[in-house]
Image: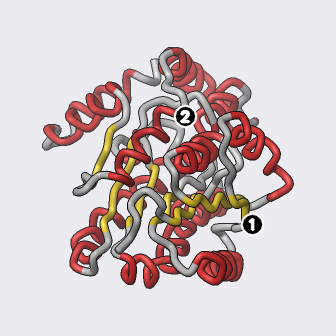
């Protein structure tokens, strides 16, 4: 039987933002946390955060865009701990842009990290999760529920993750593995801050859409003013990790809850289109 208070938890994207908060918070909860990141030279921030609350984390190199890196990391963790009980997918990148201006390769870059990176990690850990009746927890966001103007590649990647996990969850449950999505609203860290910075300083190819960019920036600035801290999202991850029957989707903030409700009742898409078009004003 798995000791629910001492699971071996693999966290991706732990160098900053939500991933860092999840790594620290799971360690605080008593789990053996393996915090992974593409560039381990950035580990000091994570280790400092863990030290301040009196916990330690095992930092490992893992690049979700590199199959060998993923396989090597998973094999090393299993060799060291004898098991993996849960994976929390936090690795991701953002992109302000539009199909009207961006080359296809820009879309591929975002999909490679956010979608295919998640697929790689889940495939690599799945045999171990099946053995241990483990859990897959993936952080998505509002962009996985509602297409965000001028975030087309990012929204596409998050929609893809949501669709894949929603499709996979029934089969996973038959294999003894639970699948959950964590859906934050605005978060004051990581990708949301990156996207906000890109709206403030848009690339040259977005100049023809400068008025629309300003509209999105105004809306985004308002949302970021009420953004939740990464630790709040991490608290939802820990609760989902320990729940006897974890829900499939966990909205972590009022904005996420309202957005999910609107999406689910918007049968012809008119409500969402009206809402997101207003974001460009």
In the image, 260 versus 239, the foreground residue is: 239
Q: Residue at x 46, y 24 (%)?
A: 280
Q: How many angstroms separate mark 2 from mark 1 (CA)?
A: 22 Å
User: Element type at marker 1?
Assistant: strand
Assess disc 2: are there few (<14), some (14-19) or many (≥20) residues with their C-alpha within 10 Å of its C-alpha: many
In x, y percent, where is residue 196? 62, 29
In the image, 253 versus 24, the foreground residue is: 24
Query: Which of the 4 image quadrants contains residue 17?
Result: top right
Q: Is residue 160 visible?
A: no
* 16 vs 164: above or below: above
In x, y percent, where is residue 3? 40, 65
* 182 vs 207: above or below: below
Q: Is residue 133 visible?
A: yes
Of the residues under marks 2 and 1, which one precedes in the sequence?
1
User: Element type at marker 2?
Assistant: helix
Q: Which mark is residue 230?
A: 2
* 51 vs 33: above or below: above
Look at the image and tell me in which quarter the C terminus lies: top left
In x, y percent, where is residue 5? 43, 56
Assess disc 1: are there few (<14), some (14-19) or many (≥20) residues with their C-alpha within 10 Å of its C-alpha: some
In x, y percent, where is residue 153? 53, 51
In the picture provided, is 57 more to the left or to the right than 243? right
Q: Residue 61 carries which label?
A: 1
In the picture provided, is 152 more to the left or to the right than 142? right
Look at the image and tell me in which quarter the N terminus lies: bottom left
Q: Most extreme residue toward the right, as rendered?
A: 41
């Amino acid at each position: 039987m798995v000791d629910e208070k001492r699971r071996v938890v693999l966290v991706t994207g732990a160098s900053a933002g939500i991933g860092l908060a999840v790594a620290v918070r799971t360690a605080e909860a008593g789990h053996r946390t393996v915090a992974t990141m593409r560039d381990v030279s950035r580990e000091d921030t994570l280790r400092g955060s863990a030290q301040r609350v009196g916990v330690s984390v095992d930092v490992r190199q893992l690049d979700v865009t590199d199959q060998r890196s993923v396989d090597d990391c998973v094999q090393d963790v299993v060799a060291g701990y004898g098991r993996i009980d849960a994976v929390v997918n936090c690795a991701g990148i953002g992109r302000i842009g539009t199909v009207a201006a961006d080359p296809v390769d820009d879309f591929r870059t975002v999909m490679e990290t956010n979608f295919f990176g998640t697929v790689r990690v889940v495939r690599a850990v799945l045999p171990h999760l099946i053995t241990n009746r483990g859990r897959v927890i993936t952080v998505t966001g509002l962009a996985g529920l509602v297409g965000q103007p001028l975030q087309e590649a990012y929204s596409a990647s998050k929609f893809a993750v949501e669709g894949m996990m929603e499709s996979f969850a029934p089969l996973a449950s038959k294999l003894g593995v639970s699948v959950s999505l964590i859906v934050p609203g605005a978060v004051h860290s990581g990708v949301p801050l990156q996207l906000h910075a890109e709206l403030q300083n848009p690339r040259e190819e977005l100049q023809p859409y400068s008025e629309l960019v300003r509209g999105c920036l105004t809306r985004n600035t308002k949302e970021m003013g009420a953004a939740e801290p990464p630790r709040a999202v991490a608290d939802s991850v820990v609760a989902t990790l320990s729940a006897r029957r974890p829900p499939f989707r966990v909205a972590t903030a009022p904005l996420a809850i309202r957005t999910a409700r609107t999406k689910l009742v918007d049968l012809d898409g008119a409500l969402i289109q009206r809402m997101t078009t207003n974001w460009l004003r």
